[in-house]
């Protein structure tokens, strides 16, 4: 039998294991033009919380009773498709299933000689592309500028900070534990780190870490952490709104300081970023990321959880910050 | 004797007449390289409220005990400067004084044959440039898009809406009285108008006026009016943060819905706009505005108050929306 994980119900507030359901079904069999895929690695990502809501966004919501889907690396075990042969590895937007069929649409071949398979869910996949495109296209960091990254020890944040260093910026990361802050500096080369859980004045800490102010803010979290960064933005600063994990589990519209006066006073910009808007930049971005990886300029960090049955818990752990770097599940 | 108006004290909350002081001084006399100017028209503008605060912004604060300064059109009455002769009219950033000296720095000659003198404080001055540059450089309206303007009956808003129509947009204005809303449609060619004071759901009114959503929002007010517009923004929408008059008199940091989730979901941008950042665009902008004015494509609306002694009250009246179009004082 084949196993899958479906959305049992839409969570209110923080999601829990009860929002997921394990289902079994007959093992599927490919017809002409199809491949049978065996899941190797599953990506769990904060943005998926948004798809659990029944609301309009840049990507359709998950449907109750249907498998969750996201980025997956899988092995071709049987092929009736000319472009794929058994033993190939592919990446695609696929279901949380042990085995599944595909027509090949949207599948990309991945090569474990170029990078470890799990890296195609991280630095060589959507995570790396998000970091690269968001920073390049909206943040536009210049040499000598100060870059602040929130969620800095996470999958995207840890790559953003490293690219910032490659670009010649002073890079300051905000994370949720002293261990993570230490790792930002020792493993990822950040100039400074701030543990937002042990300070009651993020704004003052940012001012100390960025004495000349902040030019680019790559924001993965929003909320009060960002309020503190906003106050330190320099004129003509750019805020990349990539994520807002502080609010993904909110049950009512979050409120906070209004930003308009600050945007006007400092000629700031805030721009919402979705990686899929930049598909035309992907080939060049992947080439650059791959080169940096091989030159040793980019450290690739991941938290690997083992076992198909642990996918939901791994997803839940994103919201308590249990991961360092990219969170993936090895099936 | 010469009269001037100084900042008597910094207002807390809404400014009042007591924040201004009328002073007298000896009539100044130009030395070599100077001109004596007689004020003809004084511009009063919402942004000046910001300069009454003792805080860092894009322009230094007014100093207590010193004359207020802003855009003024004046007549050269005496000249010891090679570039100016008696009878010339000039525009510049000058003090609220009946007479004052200038070295000529920053003064621009204006021609009453090209446009009425007061227009150089409005459609042919900072107001027109603000509307033109903010809309062109940040709003980037495309033919067939929907443009919403708040503070639509004001100096900047009424020009923004007309430029939007010239660009082929559906234009909806938000203003504070039925009279103003009627004028938006009859005088300025807006497609629809909303009186924010007589609705309790701006969002629903915007949805009705813009059934295909909002692509560009030119925001002069911020606050709850903007909350209603934000909810109706289309993907890739652009918000031009030009003004925030709803908050200029706030005594504590204003709060409201956090915008990050919306920015991400819809790939929106918000950008603070200051006209002085775009000085290199001014010559082309003035040429275009002048052409539209002469072609009759741009209606020029102003509220003219008479008398030097009424300058402070005219400024205060901006915050209760007494003006339609540009508010100027004829001295």
Image: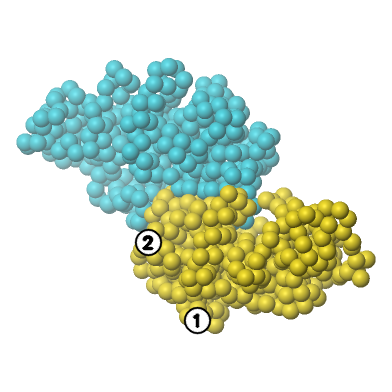
Chain colours: A cyan, B yellow
Vertical position of residue A288 compared to residue B118: above or below? above
The quadrant in which residue A112 appears is: top left
Q: List the residue tagged with mark 1.
A: B182
**Foreground mark, 1 or 2?**
2
Q: Residues within 10 Å of mark 2 (few under 14, many from 20)?
A: few
Image marks 1 and 2: residues in contact by CB distance under 8 Å: no
Q: Which mark is residue B143?
A: 2
Residue density around tag 1, few if under 14, some if 14–19, many if 20 or more, within 10 Å = some
Q: CA distance from mark 1 to mark 2?
A: 24 Å
The answer to whether one can see residue A98 in this image is yes
Rendered view: B295 above or below A170: below
Residue under the image location 53 percent in, 55 percent down: B284
Looking at the picture, how far across and down is residue B20, in whole percent?
A: 82, 68
Which secondary structure, mark 1? Answer: helix
- Label 2: chain letter: B
Query: Does residue A228 sit above or below B167 in this rendering?
Result: above
Identify the element where label 2 is drawn. loop
Residue A226 drawn at (x, y percent): 57, 45
In the picture, the quarter occupied by the N terminus of chain A is top left
Q: Nearer the viewer, residue B128 or A57?
A: B128
Viewer-proximal residue among A321 and B127: B127
């Amino acid at each position: 039998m084949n196993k899958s994980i479906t959305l049992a119900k839409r969570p209110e507030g923080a999601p829990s294991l009860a929002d997921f359901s394990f289902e079994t079904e007959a093992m599927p069999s490919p017809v002409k033009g199809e491949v049978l895929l065996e899941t190797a690695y599953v990506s769990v990502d904060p943005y998926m919380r948004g798809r659990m809501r029944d609301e309009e966004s840049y990507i359709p919501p998950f449907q109750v009773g249907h498998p969750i889907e996201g980025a997956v690396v899988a092995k071709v075990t049987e092929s009736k498709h000319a472009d794929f042969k058994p033993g190939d590895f592919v990446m695609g937007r696929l279901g949380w299933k042990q085995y599944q069929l595909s027509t090949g649409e949207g599948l990309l071949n991945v090569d474990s000689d170029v990078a470890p398979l799990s890296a195609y869910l991280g630095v060589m996949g959507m995570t790396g592309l998000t970091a690269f495109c968001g920073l390049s296209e909206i943040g536009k960091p210049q040499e000598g500028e100060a870059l602040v990254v929130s969620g800095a020890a996470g999958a995207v944040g840890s790559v953003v900070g490293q690219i910032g260093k490659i670009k010649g910026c002073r890079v300051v990361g905000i994370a949720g534990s002293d261990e993570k802050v230490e790792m930002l500096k020792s493993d990822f080369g950040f100039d400074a780190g701030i543990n937002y859980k042990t300070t009651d004045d993020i704004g003052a800490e940012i001012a100390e870490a960025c004495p000349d102010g902040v030019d680019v803010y790559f924001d993965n979290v929003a909320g009060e952490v960002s309020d503190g960064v906003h106050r330190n933005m320099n004129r003509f600063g750019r805020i990349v709104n990539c994520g807002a994990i502080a609010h993904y589990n909110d049950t009512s519209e979050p409120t906070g300081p209004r930003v308009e006066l600050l945007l006007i006073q400092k000629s700031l910009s805030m721009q919402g970023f979705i990686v899929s808007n930049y598909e035309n930049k992907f080939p060049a971005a992947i080439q650059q990321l791959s080169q940096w990886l091989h030159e040793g300029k980019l450290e690739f960090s991941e938290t690997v959880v083992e076992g198909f049955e642990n996918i939901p818990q791994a997803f839940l752990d994103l919201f308590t910050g249990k991961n360092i770097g990219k969170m993936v599940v090895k099936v």
